[in-house]
Image: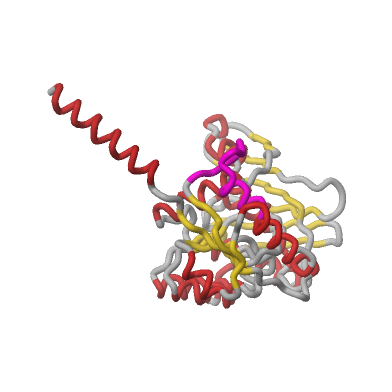
Amino acid sequence: MKKTIFLFWIFALFAAALAQDKPPIRLGIIGTDTSHVPAFTQMLNDPSRPDHVPGARIVAAFKGGSPDVESSRTRVDKFAAEIKDKWGVELVNSIEELCQKVDAVLIESVDGRPHLEQIKPVLKAKKPVFLDKPFAGSLRDAKEIVRLAKAAGVPFFSSSSLRFVPDIQELKKNPALGDLIGAIAYSPSPTEPHHPDLFWYGIHGVETLYTLMGAGCESVTRTNTNGADVVTGRWKDGRIGTFRGIRDGKQSYGAVAFGSKAVLIKEPKTSYRELVIEIVKFFQTGTPPITPEETLEIMAFMEAADVSKKKNGAPVSLSEVLGHK
């Protein structure tokens, strides 16, 4: 018995040593026009930081960029130079060249419209991929990304960082809440003319809502003014979930959870670290933390909200916008 225990601990120590000696996963970035690029890079590449995430390293980047989007045009070169000069990231001339140098890819382009074309060579190279928000520039493109990834057998996921922040996870799992019977989530929601309204930034609050409610929304209605949006979803089990998008007044993130035992309110401390941990874990295991089906439903929720706005607040089914009539 003692010999068996001794051998077990020898094996465990050997496995731990192998894990420590395993080289970090080589990551490539597509699109250097978002603040996520330097934030993620320093978190992964600088082990001296208190928020360092081990296991992966950004080694190469393709700048990309969208001249007709101001926040892309004014930042793409600046952030590319920053990650090159501070963390030694190699800048390459094409996505195909990038894929030859890395094990996995992060599509970070702040403009969702090029994501479909950007992911095609990544899928051809069989590299697992994380797509930052906005997942795509349209619901049609989102559906095509999912179709192509499934056909290629390449795992992917997309998420707002709000899904994984501890405050939202704790709110969801708090036993004092009882059964969750409804929720309100809110976030800033500025718009960008080349994207459906909520795709650009409202996704953060919508993702928070889905983190609490889960999938299963069947229809939405939207009330819109210049200063705010209120999008109310009806879930198949009869629950109601609401997103409030803020443009006027105090810009904040938060959620209200309505439970069978309590009503709980939380304004989370925002952080990228938990998302980066999930990204590294995904690249290590190949298992995404969110299903493609839920990601598509979130996109359909936001698309249906746009259609409801055009119909003066009329209810719009997610099946209608997904083409499942």
Q: Is residue 36 magenta?
A: no
Instruction: Name the quarter where the N terminus is drawn.
Output: top left
Residue 131 image point, x, y percent:
57, 63
Region in magenta:
38-54
Residue 53 image point, x, y percent:
54, 44
Residue 143 visible somewhere in the drawing = no
> Which residue is drawn at the image coordinates 52% and 73% (left, top)?
97
> Which residue is drawn at the image coordinates 57% and 77% (left, top)?
117
Q: Which residue is most to the top? A: 2
> Which residue is drawn at the image coordinates 28% and 34% (left, top)?
12
Q: Is residue 46 magenta?
A: yes
Q: In terms of image quadrants, where is residue 80? A: bottom right
Residue 220 image point, x, y percent:
65, 62
| Rendered position, 93 above or below 271 | below
| Rendered position, 1 above or below 247 | above
Residue 74 image point, x, y percent:
79, 66
Q: In terms of image quadrants, where is residue 76? A: bottom right
**Considering depth in this image, is 68 or 184 the residue closer to the camera?**
68
- Give left or right: position of 233 versus 194: left
| Rendered position, 57 above or below 100 | above
**Considering depth in this image, is 20 or 219 the residue closer to the camera?**
20
